[in-house]
Structure formats: C-alpha cells, structure tokens
Image: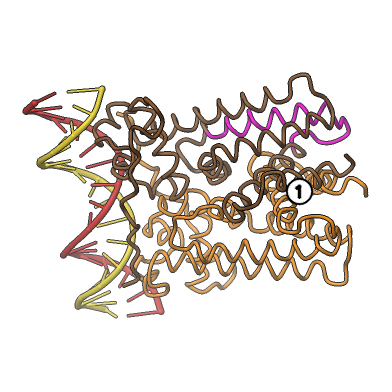
Chain colours: A orange, B brown, C red, D yellow
Amino acid sequence: MTTSAIPPPAPAYPDTAQPRRGTRGCIVDAAVALIADRGFSATSVDDIATAAGVAKGSIYYNFGSKTALFEAVIVAGVDRLTAALRASVVDLEGPAAIEALVTELLVQVQAHPDFAKLVVAEVFRTGRDWQHSIQQVREESMAVFADVVRATWPDRDPSLTAAALFGATLVAGLEWLAFQPHRPAADVRAAVLATVLPST
Amino acid sequence: MTTSAIPPPAPAYPDTAQPRRGTRGCIVDAAVALIADRGFSATSVDDIATAAGVAKGSIYYNFGSKTALFEAVIVAGVDRLTAALRASVVDLEGPAAIEALVTELLVQVQAHPDFAKLVVAEVFRTGRDWQHSIQQVREESMAVFADVVRATWPDRDPSLTAAALFGATLVAGLEWLAFQPHRPAADVRAAVLATVLPST
DNA sequence: GTCTATACGTCGATAGAC
DNA sequence: GTCTATCGACGTATAGAC
C-alpha cells in the first residue's frame, strides 16, 4: 500500500483565461500556478503542457528546458515586483515610505499569490540550479526595503531590518491568502502596520 | 545540452556523527538536511540512504515509504519547536513574553536551520500529500504566538499579528543563516526586536 | 511553430539472501 | 534488521511529421 502516487492531472487552463495571450504567456502562467502548489520537481512538463493547453514539444521549443522555463518565470516575476515596490515609494520618506512598501507588497502578494508562494518556497534553498536567479529577487526586493530603512531609521541594521519587515509582510500576506482568504485586505494591512509601525 | 542533472552524491553522514544514534535517527537527520536543500521531490531515497550510510531497503523497512519518512521528519521537528516555544514563555507576560518568543524562535532556527528552511519551503503549499502534517506545525507554533499576542495586545488581531511576528523572526533568522552567517546572533535578535517591539 | 511518438535515464518500491 | 538486485512506472528531452 502506502499509495504515494501524486494526483496527476490538473484542471484546464484555457487560452481564453486572459484575453489574447501568446503561447509563451499561457505556458508561464500555468507553470507558476502548478509549481507554486506542488514544487518544481513534483511538477512535470506534461502537467504544465496540459494545463497550458499546448503540447510538450512547444514548451521545449519556446524555452529549451524545464529549468530554463522556471528561470524565465522567476525573472518575469522579479522585474514586476521590484518595479512595483520602487514605484510605490517615490517622493515618500520616513514612516510613510515604510507604510507604502508594506501596502504595495501586500497588493503584489494578493495579485500574484502563486509567485509569492513560489518565492517563499525557493528563496532559502542553496542546492538548486536556479539559485542565482532567485537570489536576484531577494537582493533586489530586499534592497528596496533596505534603502528605505536606512533613510528612516539610521540607527537600525538595514539588511536585517529589511528582512524582518519583508518577512512580516510576506508571511502575514500568505497566511491571509492561504488560510484566511475571507478576511478583507485592510485587516492584514492593519495587523502588519500595527506590528512594525506601532507609533503611527 | 542544458545540463539539468542534479549533482547526485552527498557527503557521508557517519553513524558517529552523534554519539550512539539509531538507524532511524541517522536516516531522519540525513533526510532533513537533504530535503531542506533540494526539496522533497528532488531528493531521492537513494541519496538519503547514501548520506545516512544505510541501504535503501532499511529506509523502507523503518518508514514504509518516502512520504511516511518525510512526515516523521516533520512531526519530530514540530514537537521539538512547539515545546521549546511554550517553555520559553512560562511565567512571562506582555512585551517580555514577546521578546522571549522571538529569542527562542531564533535559537531554534540557529539550532536546526535545515528544519527551518524546510518549514518555510513547504508551509504555504496546498497541493501536497503531507499538507496535513505540516499545517500542524503552522497551527501549533502560530498558536503559541497568538496566545501571547492576545494577552499582550488585546486590540490587535491575534492570528494575523502572530503571523507577522513569526514571519519577521523566521525570515530575518534565515537571512542571517543563509546569507550573513558571520553576524553575531545578538545582531539579529536586536534587529527583530527593534522592528516588532520598538518601545522597549 | 506546434504536434505525436519515442529513446533514455532515474526513481520509488519490493523480493529474497544473510 | 540490514543488505543487494531488480522491476515497473514515469519524466525529460529529442526527432520528425505536419
């Protein structure tokens, strides 16, 4: 016994999910969703192909390898996240900037929950091929937080404080999405801000 | 090309690593370390057997299946973590209890970094066999934090605040171990406490 | 540019000797 | 209780038709 078979199929991911989407886009979307839920190795290229509504060959034609597909998924997500974080703090300083950063990270987590799960799942691993790609997420996103911390609290350690802020927001956000999705976004935002900015 | 082969072997894990350790103990130790670094599916039973210094058959004799082995790894870690957290707050109240919780979680992360990575990597996944086991970690450990939050800040949301505190401590701790291991533990503790308990 | 069919390797799990 | 040898299933990647 000890049935260890992984429930194989996967619901369909029709081309019409997003209006007029290229093959590459469909594949990337399906890959993020599946990998976020089951992990990289547990997700077969067959599964991704089925979910994206394309043939396996098309994935290899467009991305070359399973690893390359995953790296493409990551850099796409990183660019989006970092740009959003940076944009949220222009012309802002002090606690207002911190507040904006926390709020924007929560917005991003809500908008792209699969990517958020995926980042959390992979970012502290050291023995993987795409280690380099994923550390860029960490470095770039953390850097935005660290810059703001430096300007807001000169006496605090920038990188460790950034990690604490990032961790508080991300984990609270995922707790919300994964286990308390019925809660309004404002509750989560309030709880995080009360924790890291109690003076406001 | 696109060499996607996973570097297979793994350093030895001699029986003498811990003085007088049973077969089961060796297997569990090797499994946590490997799975924390490469993930569950990317870690083969062969790898675990080699690293533990036993034959693959012995793993199946002792645990029955790969999944069962992983669940055993998890519950062992959970019990240890929850017990340590609960023990750290007896006879403590208010900010002192929060401080003790943060400190103890950092101690546990430092003492068992592999298990910490593993928890972070798996806790927000929903499509896995051991989902039930790992959610126990989350629920039990979060509950300790939530209880203290309830007693300390009656006006804050217990579960979301607990998630924020847990996340801040865990992510800062892992940032430290994975990317800034040279820093003294006191720095990390100070940074987290300054973030979540600035008034003290 | 996308599909089908298939080669080749690897992995989880079992059987049976010791 | 631990080992070695082996089976069957599945997964990545490629070749070639359309």
Where disc 1 sits, the SS reads: helix
Q: Residue most toward the top?
A: B91
Q: Nearer the viewer, residue A198 or B89?
A: B89
Image location of residue B29, percent across then percent down: 42, 35
The residue under label 1 is B191
Residue B98: horizontal and vertical position, in percent? 78, 33
* Residue under the image location 35 percent in, 40 percent down: B13
Q: Is residue A89 magenta?
A: no
To which quarter of the image does residue B147 belong? Answer: top right
Q: Tell me the magenta residue range.
A: B134-159
**Crowd class of label 1 (few under 14; some 14 to 19; many from 20; radius 10 Å):** many
Instruction: Give left or right: position of A127 versus B87.
Output: left
The residue at the point 55 percent across, 62 percent down is: A134
Q: Quadrant of the N terminus of chain A?
A: top left
Viewer-closest of B138 and B31:
B31
A107 up-or-down from B155: above or below: below
Kindly indicate the quadrant of the structure image that contains residue B163.
top right
- The overriding secondary structure of the stretch rendered in magenta is helix
The three-letter amino acid code for the residue at tag 1 is: Ala
Q: Is residue A98 left or right of residue C7?
A: right
